[in-house]
Amino acid sequence: MTGLTKTLAKSRTRARTRTPDLSLAPAAVRETSGPPFWTTRRRDVLAGYLFITPQLAGVVLFVLIPVGLAIWYSLNDWNVFTGEQTFVGAGNYAALADDPQLASVLGATAVFCGGVVVLNISLGLLLAVLLNRRFRGATFFRTLFFSPVVVSVVAWTLVWGFLLQDNGGVNGLLGAVGIKGPNWLQDGDTAMLSVIITQVIRSVGVNMVLFLAALQGVPTHLYEAARIDGAGSRVIFTRITLPLISPTVLLTAIITVVGALQSFAQIAVLTGGGPELSTTVLVYYVFQQAFEFNHIGYGSTLALMLLSFVMLLTLVQWQLRRKWVFHEE
């Protein structure tokens, strides 16, 4: 009996000292341990932040910090050679009203931007409609019209600079048919036209591809139903095609406007802003003031003006989408 008593006593002692199983305990006991820290929601949030960190770092380093520095520089008169900075407050902004060249620069910017946007979108849509059909050689022509996009801007502009000279290839072709061509890049009436056409030919391939993708997403049964009802090609395009691809039209309008306002290499290589100020757009005028004339503060002020124009035009187009973009309320 003594051995049996000792065995029972040891069993009771182990039962009292054993760690309780909380999974079998009542809910009140389990709640005292608390939920785990890495819940599914917290893991998802962390993964999301990790994914956006590279993009967020790029925005901070290459957008927010440069804009902040531009605002600071616009409030100062900075001589980069001596390193001296003089705080002038709103002096550079007041100088905008006294700049006799600014009106001509803004006019040239409006002409260049308007010409590039209208020709780029309309020509890109026309090419997309033509190349959306099935015919022999369609792939070749799509590649042909898109190929200038992948060419270096400087290389493309240098080639066109030679072609548009007084004795260049363009005037050579015109002379072969008995037409005397002008000096395209030295005449104020043709210099801007030359820059616009050069820019449009190079960049129209992007809009063409975007419009092609949009056209191929239009349901074909809508075309068939319209033809059964007796609708012609013009009615089908204006009542079916154009409304259904209007989101793509909005996208191309925004990126084309922003791209036109930022066009610098074409102006710098082809005309250098001349003759006189006929091709001096705002982005090139920023470069001249900041780096050629050493007016860093005034150049920063002009850069902020350009940024304001880009943001304003983008906002206007975005707000107008409710009136002419399909599926937008």
Image (spheres, rainbow, N blue to C red):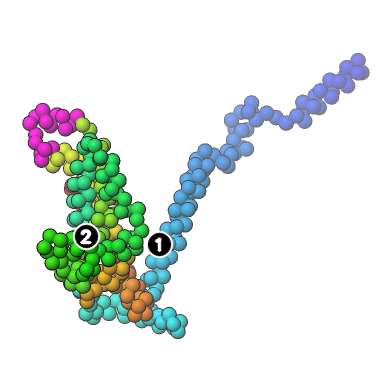
Image-quadrant location for residue 268? bottom left
User: Which residue appears farthest toward the left when viewing the image?
Assistant: 230
Label 1 sits on residue? 63
Label 2 sits on residue? 197
Give yes or no for contact between labels 2 and 1 (Cβ–Cβ under 8 Å): no
Residue segment shown in magenta: 221-236
Residue 4 appears at what percent x and percent y?
88, 17
Q: CA distance from mark 2 to mark 1?
A: 31 Å
Residue 90 as seen in the image, left or right of residue 244: right
Nearest the viewer among 1 and 280 is: 280
Nearest the viewer among 324 and 155 is: 155
> Which residue corresponds to the image point at 50% horizontal and 44% vertical from the top-left?
47
Q: Label 2 is placed on what type of residue?
A: Ile
Q: Label 1 is placed on what type of residue?
A: Val
Residue 74 appears at what percent x and percent y?
36, 75
Q: Is residue 293 visible?
A: yes
Nearest the viewer among 69 and 165 is: 165
**192 shown above or below 249:** below
Prevalent SS, magenta region: helix
Residue 55 appears at what percent x and percent y?
44, 53
Residue 323 appears at what percent x and percent y?
18, 48
**21 shown above or below 188:** above
Q: Secondary structure at mark 2?
A: helix
**277 shown above or below 130:** below
Count the labels in the image: 2
